[in-house]
Amino acid sequence: MEHFFTVLVIINILVFFYFILVNGSYIVLIILSYFQTKQSREKENLYELSGLYGTNLYRTVSILAPAFNEEQSVIESTRALLNLQFSDYEVIVINDGSTDQTMQKLIDHFDLRIVERHVAKLIDCKPVKAIYGSRKYPKLIVVDKENGRKADALNAGINVSRKDLICAVDSDSLLEADVLRRMMMAFTENQEIIAVGGVVRVANGCSFRHGVVQNIRTPKSYFGRIQAVEYLRAFLFGRTGWDYLDSLLIISGAFGVFDRKAVIKVGGYLHETVGEDMELVVRLHRYHREKGIPYRIRFLPEPVCWTEVPEDWQTLSRQRNRWHRGLADTLFRHRVMLFNPKYGRLGMAAMPFFLFVELIAPVIELGGYLIFLLSYLIGAINITFFLLFLTAAILLGVIMSVLAVLIEELTFRRYDRMWDVLILVVYAFLENFGYRQIYAWWRFKGLIDYFKGDLEWGEMKRGGAFKVS
């Protein structure tokens, strides 16, 4: 029994330091991202002053927007894409075999007609039934194809596209008008850049008119507000921190710009995964490292895409389960990079971080709670250590979230009402009591489902954050 007690004490100490390491690493990323954000804002101001934003010195862009059963939001989001402040781009909406009124609404609203367009099948995808053009909007192309899920739809869009770059967005997302010009800042300053990610913000609670955000507000629901904090932390600071270290592994599937030729060279988006966005970015890294081709993958903290997030328990749990399965699949497919100095900081820092801090975190977190409780009940640890662990775990999580909210407000000041900022600060505190533990369970279940071979997306219910007005 004495040996059992000793083992429990050692495990408890290891779990305690793991919690400190995880949250400490996040805080370091937030600090690094603060400096990276300041540098990015200074460059942006320089571009404004030099007049580069007003020139046509940019590469051309094809915006790809897959749509599956998006009848509530597809018109408003497409209209927003057609109103972007950019000289040479096309919008390609890919109807991926929708079973609702998505296609008919597109036909009716944009006055679509079938057109002849040569399509070279550079990447494999499901058959295309028809390609439509609009009498009113020359920039708009609509592809009607058989259902093959998001990766397949994006590959079809790449085949149809004719521009230098591709911008992948979700059809339930809305880009701000100047977003492409801001994204092009990275491609203009460095010819070796092959991909750039931007910020995704929560649209729930905000008001929109003709594809333009009118009032930025926090969501009204508990889950919506929690996710608003999560998105601030993950996009503005987690990914900006990895950009500072030149080791960005994720560009959100909701919003990213890629060099078309580079994507075609690596075979496009992968079908056999639910994490096609991260997998493509990691594959681009791996391909260019192995071929010795100079390249860079960047993240910019200012270009904004607004997206509708789920506000019901079941949809949110399915989404987070899928995200974790996608993470597991990507890390397993590219496990050769792990701790491999051939891949530089990617192999020695970024991949281990996502393995030990992201992938297995729910296992250790849930297991840690159970072990600590068991140890306390049988007397293996005293009440002081037990309370110290809980306090440290919760306090570090609170500090990390509150820091993200406050630094965002100091840097960008997106929310014009102090009340909204206070709401986010409160929910940055509240998420650590209940939601964080539930989220760990969702991720844990996602890991189990991955080992079972589950590749299902699950139904994503929309509440209609972007209503046509």
Image (cartoon, rainbow, N blue to C red):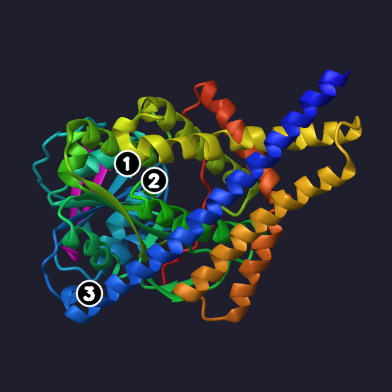
At x 73% / y 49%, what residue is drawn?
A: 434
**Mark 1 → mark 2, Cα distance in angstroms:** 6 Å
Which numbered disc, 1 or 2, marks the residue that appears first in the sequence? 2
Crowding at label 3, few (<14), some or many (≥20) Cα neighbours within 10 Å?
some
Q: At which x and y percent is residue 191?
A: 15, 54
- Residue 113 lies left or right of residue 35; in this view the side is left
At x 52% / y 69%, what residue is drawn?
A: 407
Q: How many marks?
A: 3
**Mark 2 → mark 3, Cα distance in angstroms:** 26 Å
Query: Is there a contact, CB below 8 Å, between mark 3 and mark 1?
Result: no
Q: Nearer the viewer, residue 17 or 139?
A: 17
Residue range in magenta is: 128-144
Query: Is there a contact, CB below 8 Å, between mark 1 and mark 2?
Result: yes
- Report helix, strand or loop for mark 2: loop
Residue type of the residue flagged with mark 3:
Tyr
- Report helix, strand or loop for mark 1: helix
Crowding at label 2, few (<14), some or many (≥20) Cα neighbours within 10 Å?
many
| 346 in magenta | no
Which numbered disc, 3 or 1, marks the residue that appears first in the sequence? 3
Task: State whether residue 212 appears in this view.
Answer: yes
Mark number displayed over residue 281: 1
At x 31% / y 73%, what residue is drawn?
A: 42
Query: Is there a contact, CB below 8 Å, between mark 2 and mark 3?
Result: no
The residue labelled by disc 3 is: 47
The secondary structure that dominates the magenta segment is strand
